[in-house]
Amino acid sequence: NIFKDSNLSETNFTLVGMAGLIAGVLHAPLTSLFLIAEITRGYELIIPLMITAAIAYLTSKYFVPYSVYTMQLAKRGELITRHKDKAVLTLMKLHTEVEKDFNNISPNATLGDLVKVVSKSSRNLFPVVDDKDILHGVITLDDIREIMFKPEMYDTVKVQSLMTIPQTYVHLSDSMDIVMEKFTKSNAWNLPVINGKKYVGFVSKSKLFNAYRKLLVEFSEE
């Protein structure tokens, strides 16, 4: 005790410090107040408890937005919040929204091979994938519209020379927040989904919006 002439209890300092620890780590300032009040069987320390708990909570909240109980959930993108939009995104799972009904084409294939694939597909997007399921690029109908009806080019033009590299990739482990951020930054309507380095499929902005609206209605009715 550095104040030798003062009658300050070290026990009180310990209890107030305990309240600060609980308020900071658990993000529960009221819990810390009432817990220490119950331990001491009184409210003599209520003022120092309130000051300490408030400072500890606000400081901890500023540097670490989540408590020790919610931190791991937040890192995995599984934390349900009061913010309705974020809560709906948390409920959405990427693997259920991936579309796989695309016709692949090898990077070593010719324009003639690609035209045959186009004739059998209902899509206008064609992933360029090798025999190891590695995605090299994508081709759209707009990319080949001017040459797809020129048979003299069928055997000389390679798919590899026609494809474009995607602006960004969506990883199968990405949370929906990250996926939506990638759509916003790329301004794309379809993004390729990969697992490690292997091609999985595509996720479309329109399908995500439809799933989002459906979940939002269900979430609002609860």
Image (cartoon, rainbow, N blue to C red):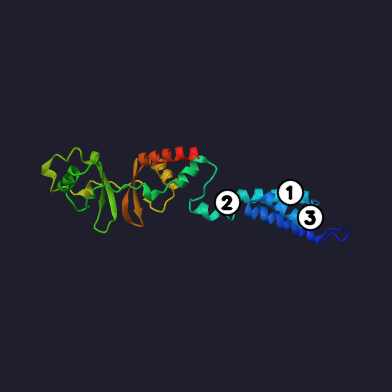
What amino acid type is highlighted by mark number 1?
Met
Give the structural element (helix, strand or loop) at label 1: helix
The crowding category of the residue bearing disc 2, from other C-alpha atoms within 10 Å (few below 14, some 14 to 19, many at least 20), is: some
* Left/right of residue 39 with respect to residue 145 in the rendered view: right
Give the structural element (helix, strand or loop) at label 3: loop
Image location of residue 82, percent across then percent down:
55, 42
What amino acid type is highlighted by mark number 3?
Arg
Q: Quadrant of the N terminus?
A: bottom right
User: Residue at left 18%, top 44%?
Assistant: 120
Image location of residue 194, percent across then percent down:
34, 53
Spot the residue most to the right. Answer: 5
What amino acid type is highlighted by mark number 2?
Tyr
Image location of residue 166, percent across then percent down:
32, 47
**Residue underneath mark 1:** 50
Disc number placed over residue 66 in the picture, else none: 2
Do labels 1 and 2 touch, CB within 8 Å? no
Give the alpha-carbon distance from disc 3 to disc 1, as whole Å. Answer: 16 Å
The crowding category of the residue bearing disc 3, from other C-alpha atoms within 10 Å (few below 14, some 14 to 19, many at least 20), is: few
